[in-house]
Amino acid sequence: MRQPYAICAQNIHKSYGKTKAVDGLSFVVKQAECFGLLGPNGAGKTTIMKMVYGKAERDARPEGVIDVLGFDPQYNPLNVRHILGVVPQEDNLDEELNVYQNLSLFAKFYGISGTAAKTAIGHLIEMMELSAHSKIRELSGGMKRRLTIARALLNDPKILILDEPTTGLDPQVRHMIWDKLRLMKKSGITMLLTTHYMEEAFQLCDNLIIMHKGQMVIEGQPRQLLQQSIEKYVLDIVNKDHAAEIGDCLNSPSIRADMSRETLHIYSDDIEALNEITTRLEPGDYFLRAANLEDLFIKATGRALDDAG
Ligand code: ADP
C-alpha cells in the first residue's frame, strides 16, 4: 500500500550562528501532489529544501523529524538521493559538454549506462524540447532550466525538488516550464517547489505554506485560501494623496483599507462599492483586480514579498 505522504517534516529548526533560518516548521507533502514553499528572500525556503535532500543538517535541539518516503535524509542520505531529483537554483551545467553529454555524465553518476541511458536521455531530450548536440553556451535561460530539470529526472525520481524553478526567466518561458511541470505531476511525481512568485504557486501547487522568517504564516490549498482568507477584490490606488478624496468611503464596513505602503490598497467582497470609489478617481490612478496570494501574504505579515526585512 502506498504511504499517504511523500515528505513529513515536524518541528524543524535550523540556525546559522545567530540567524534562525528555520524556526519550528512542520508540513506534510502528500504523494503525487505539488507542494509549495513560498515566501520572500531569506524566509528559509532553500534551507528547508537542503534539509529534505540531505545537504544540510537540522538543529539537534529542539528535536525535529524529516521523513522522506520512510528515510531520514540526515541519516540515510544515499537512500534519499535515489528517490529524489533535485533542480537547484543555479543551472550548474558543464559548459564544455553538449546537452546529450551533460545528461550522459549524470546518467553515469546514477549507474545508468548503455541502451538504458540512451533511451532515458533520448526521451528526456524530446520531452523537454531540447536538441542533443547544442552547446551549453548557446542555450537560452529557459533551455538551460529545461536541461537541468531533465537531468533531475534521469534516475526516474519519485519526488522532484525544485528550488525557484523559473526565477530570472521571462514570462513566456515561465509558462512553458509550468507546462512541463504539470506533465510531470500528471505522471505521478511528487513535487516540492519553492518560489517567491505567487502566480507560480497558484498555477502549480495543490497545497502550500507561506513562510516568513523561518516560520509558517499561512497553509492550505491556493484556491481555498483565496476564497476563505481574503476579500475577493482589491482596488490599488497608486497615489496615497487620493485618500483624502475618498476618505468617507473608507469607513464603510464592507471595506478594508491598507495604507501602510506607497500604494493604497482597498479590499472588499463588494465590487460595486469599489466601482463607486473609482468614479472619484482619474483613470490612470487606480487598478481594480482580483485578490491574489500576495495580498494574503501582506494581510498575514504586514509586508510585501519583495520587502523581506
Ligand atoms: P530563502 O531560500 O527563502 O531565500 P534561505 O533559506 O536561503 O532563504 O535563507 C534563510 C536565512 O538563512 C537567511 O537569513 C540567510 O541569510 C541565512 N542563511 C542561509 N544559508 C546560510 C549559510 N550557509 N550560512 C549562513 N546563513 C545562511
Image (spheres, helix red, strand yellow):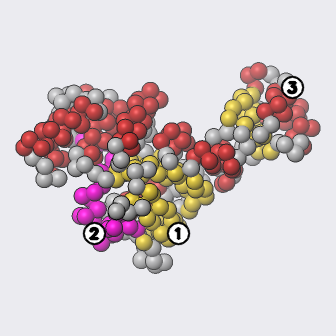
Helix or strand or loop: what does disc 1 sit on? strand
- Counting labels gives 3
Tell which of 196 and 182 is nearer to you: 182
- What residue is disc 3 on? 280
At 29% from the left and 33% from the top, the residue drawn is: 128
* Picture coordinates of residue 76, whole percent (x, y): 27, 69
As shown in the figure, which amino acid type bears the numbered disc 3?
Answer: Arg
Which quadrant of the figure has residue 300? bottom right
* Picture coordinates of residue 134, whole percent (x, y): 20, 28
* Picture coordinates of residue 223, whole percent (x, y): 60, 44
Tell which of 201 and 241 is nearer to you: 201
Classify mark 3 as within 8 Å of ligand 1 or not, answering yes or no. no
Q: Earlier in the sequence, mark 3 or mark 2?
A: 2
As shown in the figure, which amino acid type bears the numbered disc 2?
Answer: Asn
Visible residue check, residue 79: yes
Classify residue 282 as left or right of residue 289. Answer: right
Helix or strand or loop: what does disc 2 sit on? loop
- What residue is disc 2 on? 76
Q: Earlier in the sequence, mark 2 or mark 1?
A: 1
Badge 2 crowding class, 10 Å Cα cut-off, few under 14, some 14 to 19, many 20 or more, is: few
**Quadrant assignment for the N terminus:** bottom left
At 13% from the left and 49% from the top, the residue drawn is: 112
What's the CA distance linking mark 3 and mark 1?
Answer: 47 Å
Magenta region: 66-93
